[in-house]
Amino acid sequence: MKYLKYLLILILILGIVFIAKGLLTPSISYENEITVNASAKESWSVMNNETNLPKWIKGFKKIEPVSGTPNTVGAVSKVYIEEQGEEMTMEETITAVKENELMAMTFTMDFMNMDYEMSFKEKDGQTVISSKSTTTGNGIMAKSMVSFMKGAMSEQEDKNLMNLKNLIEGNSSE
């Protein structure tokens, strides 16, 4: 009986720590960067080509326009991603576009929302592609879970950017 009491106290403490982390860190932010041996124009073109999305974004299945003109500010689309065998749907809203330089968007899901920005800066025949993400959980449990996911989310973005780099450098359309 004594061990059960200690186990319950431990579980209670862990639960409090979990909830407190979500309250103290309701959102996470991270930045990723990669240098590509191609111009900003070529890099943008490859990134912005819808048929390339499954080649560099893990789990990407499809995108369906909802309203507005695709790839313009205010355009809304449904994005379908498969994660661990389950399909997730999110709504993407383009918030900023500057051709060959910047694309920003928000993703809205049941579990969380994400502000995402990708920028392209050309220097000496190469392009630095940077991404910035801020993710906020929807609800206390989601906030707590997101607060523990920063490393995994940043690591996945590194992999996606490496896939994009390989795709761009393997492209010969310029």
Image (cartoon, rainbow, N blue to C red):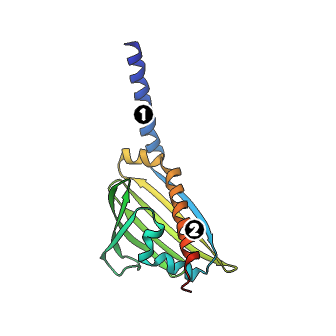
Tag 1 secondary structure: helix
Tag of residue 169: none
Tag of residue 16: 1
In this view, the residue farthest toward the left is 66
Q: How far from the left and from the top, in percent, is residue 153?
A: 49, 55
Q: Are marks 2 and 1 in contact (CB under 8 Å)?
A: no
Amino acid at the residue labelled 1 = Ile
Rendering quarter of residue 129? bottom right
Does 100 appear above or below 57? below
How would you rate the neighbour count of disc 2 (Cα within 10 Å): few for under 14, some for 14-19, many for 20 or more?
A: some
Q: Tell me which residue sits at (41%, 79%) in the image.
A: 71
Q: Tell me which residue sits at (41%, 76%) in the image.
A: 50
Q: How far from the left and from the top, in percent, is residue 163?
A: 53, 67
Q: Tell me which residue sits at (38%, 70%) in the image.
A: 93
Depth check, front residue: 80 or 30: 80
**Label 2 to label 1: alpha-carbon separation:** 36 Å
Residue underneath mark 2 = 130
